[in-house]
Image (cartoon, rainbow, N blue to C red):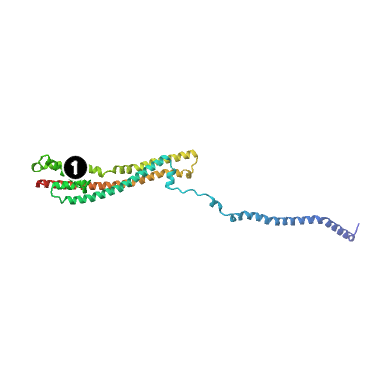
Amino acid sequence: MLDNKRMTPLIAILGAAALMMSAPAFAQDAAAPATDAAAAATTAPAADAAAAAPAAAPAETPAEPAAATPKKGRITPITMFLEAKAFVQFVMAGLLLASVFSWTLLVTKLLEFGSLNRKSDRFVEAYRGTKTIADIGRLALSDEFEGNPLADMAAAAASEVELSRQAGLAVNGAHRDTTIMRAQAAVSAVQSSLAKRLSSGMQFLASVGSSGPFIGLLGTVYGIMNSFIGIAESNTTNLAAVAPGISEALLATAIGLFAAIPAVVIYNYFQTRVSAYGTRSDGFNAELMNNISRLLDKGA
């Protein structure tokens, strides 16, 4: 057996040989982590740059989609009328024409009543200055008061008295009341035509005021019906797809109200003025009959 002194150098030599044989493996194991760390360090900036690129892209890209999106045309009553169905257009056009006629009647009758009242005032002032029935007739038949209802009433009464005289009838005394009754009948005939003359155009206003909303509603119903038919054919319930059609239909009702409301107001206004002038003509009729009765008693 070898002693301890000789075994110690041998163990040292064998350990050194073992370390030398295992050194390449240790070197490879130590180099591998270093290589992985270097590769990770190399790829990390590239990955960070790639991740940062999409985030930076929106900031660099201008907001082109909003500017490039085309804007739809603005919807106005005119465009709704032009894009409506033919029947709805016909309804709206008829209501607009009725509205134009209503406003035309307003202007026409304002001028008519203004001239009528001024001429009537002048006639009544001149009439109260007459002294005989013949003077009343000449004044009423003058060109200055031609066509005036009060002048026509006075002319009818004076003409009836003169016709009775020319026929050889007694117009005063016991026959005074009979003469006044004939004159009254002649004046009443003139008043009947007066009511018809002053009421011209009133029936049209009444018709527009009462039926205008319903005519507009007819166009609305027709337009909405077509809109729902379009929904069924397109298989979509998107409100934006049918909103223009519904708005066109509702425009017909709006125009109906636009035509009807002024027509009702104009009708009521002129109905009041017709009634007021009718009351004035009744008052003049009473004054005329009293004057003729008084002149007959005087023999004038």
Q: Residues within 10 Å of mark 1 (few under 14, many from 20)?
A: some
Q: How many marks on residues?
A: 1
Q: Quadrant of residue 97?
A: top left
Up-down: is 8 above or below 179? below
Q: In the image as oriented, which residue stretches furthest toward the left?
A: 173
Residue drawn at (53%, 52%) of the image:
67
- Secondary structure of the residue carrying numbered label 1: helix
- Percent of width and height locating residue 180: 13, 43
Q: Is residue 64 visible?
A: yes
Q: In the image as oriented, which residue stretches furthest toward the bottom?
A: 5
Q: Is residue 220 visible?
A: no
Residue drawn at (33%, 43%) of the image:
208
Q: Quadrant of the N terminus?
A: bottom right
Residue that mark 1 sits on: 188
- Percent of width and height locating residue 145: 21, 48
- Percent of width and height locating residue 132: 13, 48
Residue drawn at (25%, 49%) of the image:
115
Q: Quadrant of residue 6?
A: bottom right
Q: Nearer the viewer, residue 19 or 80?
A: 80
- Percent of width and height locating residue 138: 17, 47
Q: In the image as oriented, which residue stretches furthest toward the front?
A: 143
Q: Is residue 180 left or right of residue 202?
A: left
Q: Nearer the viewer, residue 36 or 291?
A: 291
Residue drawn at (35%, 46%) of the image:
100
Q: Is residue 163 left or right of residue 15?
A: left
Three-letter amino acid code at disc 1?
A: Ser
Q: Nearer the viewer, residue 109 or 92?
A: 109
